[in-house]
Image (tube, grey):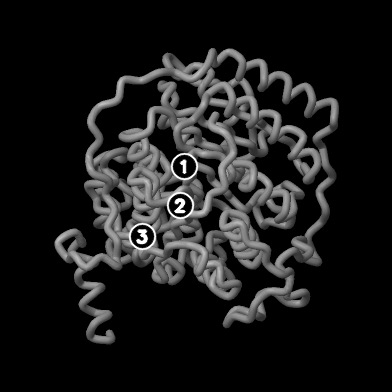
Amino acid sequence: MAGPKHKSRVAYLHDPEVGSFYYGPSHPMKPHRMQLAHQLITGYELHRKMTCYRPHKASDLEMKKFHTDEYIDFLLNISPDNMDVMQERMKQHNVGFVGQYDCPVFDGIFPFCQIFTGGSLDGAARLIDGSADVAINWAGGLHHAKSDEASGFCYINDIVLAILELLKHFPRVLYVDIDVHHGDGVQDAFLNTDRVLTVSFHKFDGAFFPQTGDVTEIGEGAGKYYSVNVPLADGIDDDSYEMIFKPVMRAICEQYDPSAIVLQCGADSLAGDRLGVFNLSIKAHGECVRFFKDYDVPLLVLGGGGYVIRNVSRCWTYETAVLTSTEVPNELPWSEYWHYYAPSYQLHAELRGKDWSYRENMNTQQGLEGLRNEVLGKVRRLGGAPGVQMKAMPRPLLYDMDSDDEDVLTDDQRRGRAMERHGE
């Protein structure tokens, strides 16, 4: 892996519309968390340390580079108004009524997917054209979606689509997932190739969603040993997590020598999460981000899970500060969502709610050492970085909204610019 280098060029992808979508009452996934995070990021003036972009809305054709035509056409046409006549196709694609399915049909389901997917594609393009060392899309990271069905609150796998773009330019891509849930959709997509090495640190007991990610899952065919899984038990804390994360990632980076890295920063691995079972602090979660930021390797940073939105926004704000090499005060800046952060109004606050019971750390030192040694043994089977014959690269699909050349803008972006001119 290349040596350390201070990354100073950070691209930040954000569309204010993404926070307005609603999965339905009582559903744990709240896109509104993106607005909270963005308010804190701008409140700390971190946007001044980055180049900020409003991403393009991904087209159905872009999505079909991984997802099946039939599935994308279904997402384009399904709505709460026509569910009654599309129930068979809904079952086929694992979506259903609000309150009954993990992946409900809600108003604007396809535009929502267009926004977060466009952000990840544009982030990849910024790394490909060399205009950024780091690209951030906190709305992305939906790692469970399969080629022909939704899964685990995820409809489109923006991660897979972004990696496919990166592979047009970079010989080897390392994917790292620190969500509490296994990154199954990404692993499955690249199960048979050595050009993508997937690593997932997650809870696994055979029953916890998505019931995959045992240490024995190592890839297939040309991809054998290029799927690395680190299954953890309930309650893992900061010291225990660092004990296994850093040695494993150092060995993988040295052995695989990635050309680009994609990091999924699911915040449901934080203590106190509604669906999570870990005891990580925001600082420990951020250490995983810090681990990668100083290397001379292009880095795409994405969001993911996270179901206590005040803590999700704290986490991704702190990690934005890490990526921009900015020290921020613990006192939160004022925003219109100030009341969400009571009573501490601090960045590094107690994450567990008053009714949340502390989970005992079931990961013993002996058990973690054994798991670490088993994983490192599999990593040594990689045998060094694979070579690859690269073809001519197509032009990256990214458009600068600040460009003076309107010919490079999509139709949606031209309409948006016209609206801005007329003050709409």
Q: Position of residue 200 (x, y in %)?
A: 59, 35
Q: Residue at x 23, y 44 (%)?
A: 395
- Mark positioned earlier in the residue sequence (1 or 3): 3
Q: Position of residue 254 (x, y in %)?
A: 59, 25
- Mark positioned earlier in the residue sequence (1 or 2): 2
Dot 1 lies on which element? Answer: loop
Dot 3 lies on which element? Answer: helix
Seen in the picture, residue 239 relative to 404 is either above or below; the reply is above
> Which residue type does callout 3 highlight?
Ile
- Mark positioned earlier in the residue sequence (2 or 3): 3
> Which residue type does callout 1 highlight?
Pro
**Nearer the camera: disc 2 or disc 3:** 2
- Give the position of the C terminus as an image quadrant: bottom left
Q: Residue at x 64, y 47 (%)?
A: 290
- Taking depth in this image into account, of 51 and 113 the one nearest to the observer is 51
Whether label 1 touches label 3, CB < 8 Å = no
> Which residue type does callout 2 highlight?
Ala
Whether label 1 touches label 2, CB < 8 Å = yes
**Nearer the camera: disc 1 or disc 3:** 1
Residue under label 3: 115
Residue neighbourhood size for the residue with mark 3, other residues' Cα within 10 Å, grouped as few (<14), some (14–19), many (≥20): many
Seen in the picture, residue 217 relative to 414 is either above or below; the reply is above
Numbered tag placed on residue 135 in the rendering: 2
Q: CA distance from mark 1 to mark 3?
A: 22 Å
Judge whether residue 91 can be spotted in this image. Answer: no
